[in-house]
Amino acid sequence: MVCLETDFLIAILRKDEGAIRKLEEFVERGEALTTTPINASELFRGAYLSKNIEENLKAVRGILSRLDLLNFNLVASEIYGRVCTELKKRGCDIGEFDILIASIALAHNERIITRNVKHFSKIGELEVESW
């Protein structure tokens, strides 16, 4: 299973060839494709901020309808608390949303595909993949 992070989803929506090839690899391997409520929220925010709101909302809804949305549950909540504290002690600020996304992925034993490797790789137990 692979959790698609916001920048990967945006690349798919923008028809980025590299992202599309990577997505095709996942599909060929039969990998379950997921995302988090945080990523979905970021996509909707972007659509509402755009000039073509209705067109972009339709595209966002279309891509999200093909993905499983991971739950933010009690396990993810505890992971969030631990990871946030560990990062703070090390002086690593990667942003609340990225910590939430990582916590949800970890709670569901998923790796993340993102171009934001710099942030996510600071969470040692998280498997991070780029394209």
Image (cartoon, helix red, strand yellow):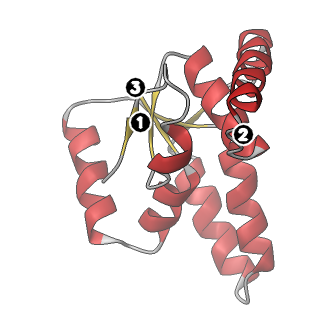
Q: Which residue is drawn at 67% across and 29% down?
A: 90
Image x and y of residue 104, in percent: 65, 26
> Which mark, by number, is residue 1?
3
Image x and y of residue 14, in percent: 45, 75
| Residue that label 2 marks | 37
Q: Is residue 42 above or below residue 82?
A: below
**Residue type at tag 1:** Val
Whether residue 70 is visible: no
| Residue that label 1 marks | 128
Whether residue 23 is visible: yes
Q: Is mark 2 on a helix, strand or loop?
A: helix
Q: Is residue 105 left or right of residue 38?
A: left
CB atoms of marks 1 and 2 within 8 Å: no
**Residue type at tag 3:** Met
Instruction: Give how far apart the Cα atoms at labels 1 and 2 are.
Output: 19 Å
The first of marks 1 and 2 along the sequence is: 2
**Quadrant in the picture for the C terminus:** bottom left
How packed mark 1 is, by other alpha carbons closer than 10 Å (few <14, some 14-19, many 20 or more), is many
**Residue type at tag 2:** Pro
